Image: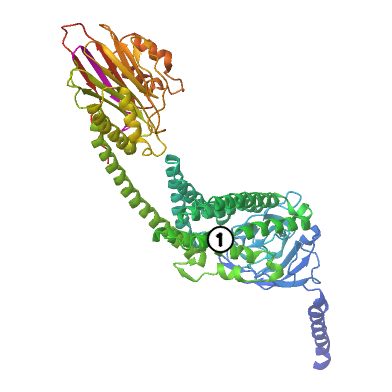
């Protein structure tokens, strides 16, 4: 046989083989899977990029590795399906990728998967087996706000089909149309490598949010100190509004800024009233800082808008708590839009407040806080308003606001970050100025008390004159540093004495000044008149128009050595003769009516008779439960013949609330030496 004859069968065989492989390469071309080949994975990682097979809808059979997905469209996985061919689509979608892991030398590591971001809930299948997922599908739908990257193991390295089932929930008012599905390329690798990749992400997240977390921690400190200061001093509502204003970024960070296991619906639902708290506290903060809190009409508008805002955001929050995948989506979206429009329009209210304060002369500290609070509020209003319905408007201003202007050590600084920092620094400066002003105010108060203490010498005689034929005891206990009670014992050349006891409405320096006027006028009148009624009439004329709607009750009596006692009363409590209250003619207090007249009453004191004068602080002593000392206790007390000091001690022990003054006058037998006793506090030193 020739060489040609012997080689012919071999040639035919080779040609047949070539024909076979050609058919193997060409015949299945229409149904060949889109295979991603990964060489030498080992302990490393590899991105699963490129085009994946994609199909809208949902069918459990699509997880099977043998399913023919060649007719599916292909999408990139470095951006969502909404940013590619399906803008505005909500519902289910499936991704599939055939992956060929070429074997490497040595032991094969376990395979793991790193999924940076998928919108919203999803399940992962490897060769038809459910390996894990994030969130839950209907009917118990759950997704998460800004979920962290998700990692899961796929078992030993082998080739197969990776299928990802995704559900994009219905849009809210601020969602854009380019959402849905895989947004960042998944990564495969060994378990150790994927764990390291996740650790790198966590570290980068913390490092790039360090400044934000630190700023919010400082806001939390301001919030705590503000609440504490307000609880200690309820007369400073600005502290409450600063605390509430500072609470908004803290609460929003907890709800939306951390990778906490809070469902999307819950996070958004609770965030809505937090936004309202921030808005309302901004309004009231501006009112107080710009000194507009006295404008009744503006306060009424603020209160009304605050109620509308809180109701609107709470209702919008309740909408967010509803499972939109199982409800009438269009009705919910419409309601969401209505509520959003309401409180977005209301958010421009700070413009009105600031406009009304333009001409006010305020300190720089107040204006700084007001300006930064206004700017933060307005930028947020613009950002939120621009986000509403952006899948229809395609406005990008909200993205511009959120874009970092610069970075420091990886920390992004957006416009809002810069304004929030300025606001915090301005609050610190305002607190500093407030502390300085309070120190100056406290110094002024201390000076006022020192002045009042000097006048205390007029309220309380340092010594009492001896009254022939009488034993006198007196005691005075103010409820504060300076009280409104007063008494004087003025000896006459004839041996008689004028005794004056009374009570000025009000307390503090104003009352002390009034007492100074009364004592000076009474001393002058006592030099010219012996009749107590004439002295009261003269005092009333001098006090009329000088008390600024106040008044003075007073009791004046003249006692003679022989026991004759003449009394005149101007609206004061009647004295006790032994254990019986004297009946005196009714009369108006001093300073109310210029033409008021006063009558005298004459009483003769026998030996050992005791006349007791007192102010209403004794009668109105009150226990912690609210029980009054009362007239019956006063009557029983005076029946026991107490000294002035022991009478006051009984009332103070019961529960003092007002100034208390008691003076007793006892007729002595002939030949017994007269005595006087005075008990009063020394001048109080105001604590610095």
Q: Could you say where residue 38 lies in the image, as x and y percent from the top left?
A: 64, 71
Q: Could you say where residue 655 lies in the image, as x and y percent from the top left?
A: 38, 22
Is 132 drawn above or below residue 676 in the view shown? below
Q: Check residue 477 for magenta coloring.
A: yes
Q: In percent of the image, x 82 and y 89: which residue is there?
A: 6
Taking depth in this image into account, of 196 and 380 the one nearest to the observer is 380
Circle 1 crowding by C-alpha within 10 Å: few under 14, some 14–19, many from 20: few
Q: Could you say where residue 11 lies in the image, as x and y percent from the top left?
A: 81, 88
Q: Dividing the picture into quarters, in which one does residue 557 lie?
A: top left
Taking depth in this image into account, of 495 and 104 the one nearest to the observer is 495
Q: Tell me if 147 is positioned left or right of 18 in this view.
A: left
Colour theme: rainbow
Q: Could you say where residue 674 lies in the image, as x and y percent from the top left?
A: 18, 13
The boundaries of the magenta stretch are 468-483
**Secondary element at tag 1:** helix
The residue that mark 1 highlights is 352
Quadrant of the rendering where the C terminus is positioned: top left
Q: Is residue 177 visible?
A: no
Q: Check residue 119 for magenta coloring.
A: no
Q: Count up the numbered dots.
A: 1
Is 408 drawn above or below residue 522 in the view shown? below
Taking depth in this image into account, of 270 and 238 the one nearest to the observer is 238
Q: Is residue 369 visible?
A: yes
């Amino acid at each position: 046989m020739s060489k040609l004859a012997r080689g012919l069968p071999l040639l035919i065989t080779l040609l047949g083989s070539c024909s076979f492989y050609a058919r193997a390469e060409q015949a299945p071309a229409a149904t060949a899977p889109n295979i991603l080949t990964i060489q030498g994975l080992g302990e490393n990682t590899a991105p699963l990029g490129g085009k994946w097979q994609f199909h809208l809808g949902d069918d459990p059979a699509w997880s099977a590795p043998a399913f023919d997905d060649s007719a599916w469209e292909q999408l990139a996985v470095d951006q969502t399906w909404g940013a590619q061919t399906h803008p505005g689509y909500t519902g289910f979608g499936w991704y599939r990728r055939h992956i060929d892991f070429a074997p490497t030398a040595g032991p094969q590591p376990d395979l793991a998967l790193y999924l940076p971001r998928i919108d919203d809930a999803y399940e992962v299948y490897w060769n038809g087996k459910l390996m894990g997922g994030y969130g839950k599908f209907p009917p118990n739908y759950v997704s998460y706000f800004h979920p962290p990257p998700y990692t899961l193991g796929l078992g030993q390295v082998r080739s197969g089909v990776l299928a990802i089932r995704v559900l994009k929930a219905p849009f809210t008012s601020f969602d854009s149309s380019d959402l849905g599905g895989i947004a960042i390329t998944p990564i495969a690798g060994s378990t150790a490598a994927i764990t390291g990749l996740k650790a790198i992400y966590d570290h980068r997240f913390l490092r790039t949010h360090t400044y934000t977390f630190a700023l919010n921690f400082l806001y939390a400190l301001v919030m705590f100190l503000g609440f504490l200061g307000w609880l200690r001093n309820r007369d400073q509502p600005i502290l409450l509004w600063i605390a509430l204003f500072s609470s908004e970024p803290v609460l929003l960070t907890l709800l939306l800024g951390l990778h906490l296991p809070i469902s999307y619906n819950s996070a958004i639902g609770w965030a809505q009233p937090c936004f309202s708290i921030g808005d309302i506290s901004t309004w009231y903060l501006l009112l107080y800082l710009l000194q507009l809190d006295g404008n009744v009409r503006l306060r009424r508008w603020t209160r009304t808008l605050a109620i509308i805002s809180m109701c609107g955001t709470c209702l919008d929050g309740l909408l967010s708590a509803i499972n939109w995948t199982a409800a009438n989506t269009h009705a919910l979206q419409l309601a969401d839009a209505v509520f959003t429009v309401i409180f977005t329009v209301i958010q421009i209210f700070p413009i009105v407040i600031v406009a009304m304060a333009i001409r006010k002369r305020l300190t720089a500290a107040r204006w700084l806080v007001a300006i930064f609070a206004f700017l933060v509020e307005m930028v947020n209003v613009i950002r939120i308003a621009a986000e509403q319905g952006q899948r229809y408007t395609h406005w990008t201003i909200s993205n511009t606001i959120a874009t970092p202007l610069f970075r420091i050590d990886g920390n992004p600084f957006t416009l809002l970050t810069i304004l929030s920092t300025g606001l915090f620094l301005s609050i610190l400066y305002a607190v500093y100025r407030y502390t300085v002003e309070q120190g100056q105010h406290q110094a002024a108060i201390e000076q006022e008390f020192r002045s009042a203490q000097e006048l205390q010498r007029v309220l309380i005689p340092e010594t009492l004159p001896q009254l022939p034929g009488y034993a006198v005891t007196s005691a005075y206990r103010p409820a504060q540093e300076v009280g409104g009670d007063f008494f004087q014992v003025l000896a006459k050349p004839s041996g008689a004495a004028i005794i004056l006891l009374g009570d000025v409405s009000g307390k503090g320096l104003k009352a002390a000044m009034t007492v100074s006027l009364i004592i000076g006028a009474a001393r002058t009148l006592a030099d010219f008149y012996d009749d107590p009624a004439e002295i009261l009439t003269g005092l009333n004329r001098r006090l009329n128009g000088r008390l600024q709607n106040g008044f003075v009750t007073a009791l004046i009596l003249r006692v003679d050595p022989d026991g004759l006692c003449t009394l005149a009363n101007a609206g004061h409590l009647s004295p006790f003769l032994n254990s019986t209250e004297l009946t005196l003619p009714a009369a108006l207090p001093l300073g109310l009516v210029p033409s008021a007249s006063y009558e005298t009453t004459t009483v003769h004191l026998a030996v050992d008779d005791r006349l007791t004068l007192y102010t209403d602080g004794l009668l109105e002593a009150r226990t912690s439960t609210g029980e009054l000392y009362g007239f019956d206790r006063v009557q029983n007390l005076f029946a026991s013949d107490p000294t002035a000091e022991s009478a006051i001690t009984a009332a103070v022990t019961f529960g003092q609330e007002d100034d208390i003054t008691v003076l007793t006058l006892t007729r002595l037998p002939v030949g017994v030496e007269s005595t006087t006793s005075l008990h009063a506090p020394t001048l109080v030193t105001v604590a610095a």
